[in-house]
Amino acid sequence: MRPVTRGDAPKNVYGVEVEFREYGDARDYLIDRIGDFCSYCEVALHGSIAVEHVQPKKHHPGLETEWSNFLLSCDYCNSIKSSKNVALDQCYWPDSDNTSRPFVYELDRAPRLADGLSPQQQSIAVQTLELTGLDREPGASNFSKKDRRWQKRREAWGVALHERRKIESSNTTHQRDSAVHVAIARGFWSVWMQVFHDDIDMRRRLNAAFRGTAKDCFDNDTQPCPRPGGQI
């Protein structure tokens, strides 16, 4: 799950903080800050883009139009997360934690827990996957054929592997730039970072190209590090 930096509330041309009459009005500002990708499953949102409330407005009405409570979501992650009232410290969040650390992405697999997590970290990571159903895959009891996120993720794996082979055949700046453009169109940052796990240059390019990726979550060699102020 890609860690993102949403930043402070946007301001208008007069330097005054924007007040949102409706939470949907924040959509374009969010896209400008963190790109048009689902904050949870990471799919590229070419169609319907929902302004997602980290803490559900049903239980926290005072946060319904609060910038710090907004992320972006695909319809499926949004509907599964729904209005579940989960305490912030019971899950890992893309805007406050380094959500690339507790999860591992493998070909044709749902995200799984990374090795080396403490029992507490494991518990939080499991709840995070369950919150939006990112642990759902074919064969699982809770899987629905209507849920195409796994298929889109698998397609992204195929495309990313193809782009890697092209770079191995012709390792040019143009080929690397082309691969990054394809990645942005597909989404699934975590898949691309895994496919290029040993290519620091490509990982740097991907982090820079996926708008809003949290810079303070990675060291100079693009390896994930604890996020300042976060749980992990």
Image (tube, rainbow, N blue to C red):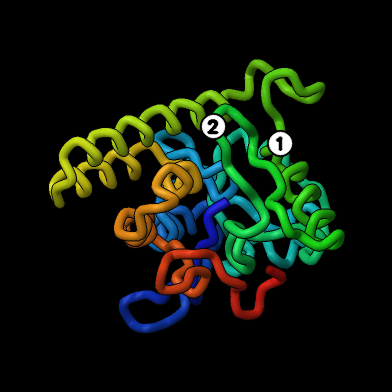
Q: Quadrant of residue 148?
A: top right
Q: Count the marks: how many?
A: 2
Around disc 1, counting alpha carbons within 10 Å, would you say few (fewer than 14), some (14 to 19), or many (20 or more)?
A: many
Can see residue 193? yes
Element at label 1: loop
Whole-number angstrom distance, CA of label 1 to CA of label 2 = 14 Å
Q: Quadrant of residue 75?
A: top right
Around disc 2, counting alpha carbons within 10 Å, would you say few (fewer than 14), some (14 to 19), or many (20 or more)?
A: some
Residue 12 image position (x, y, % from top left): 37, 75
Q: Amino acid at mark 1?
A: Asp
At 51% across and 62% down in the image, what residue appears?
4
Horizontal side, residue 154 vs residue 207: left or right: right
Residue 74 image position (x, y, % from top left): 55, 39
Residue 135, label in figure = 1
Query: 223 above or below 49?
Result: below
At 30% across and 59% down in the image, what residue appears?
201
Can see residue 59? no
Horizontal side, residue 58 vs residue 210: left or right: right
Element at label 2: loop
Query: 48 above or below 39?
Result: above
Horizontal side, residue 154 vs residue 230: left or right: left
Mark 2 sits on what residue? 107
Residue 181 image position (x, y, % from top left): 26, 44
Residue extending farthest bottom: 15
Mark 1 and mark 2 in contact? Answer it, CB < 8 Å: no
At 71% across and 70% down in the image, what residue appears?
231
Q: Amino acid at mark 2?
A: Leu
Question: Which comes before the other along the chain, label 1 or label 2?
Answer: 2
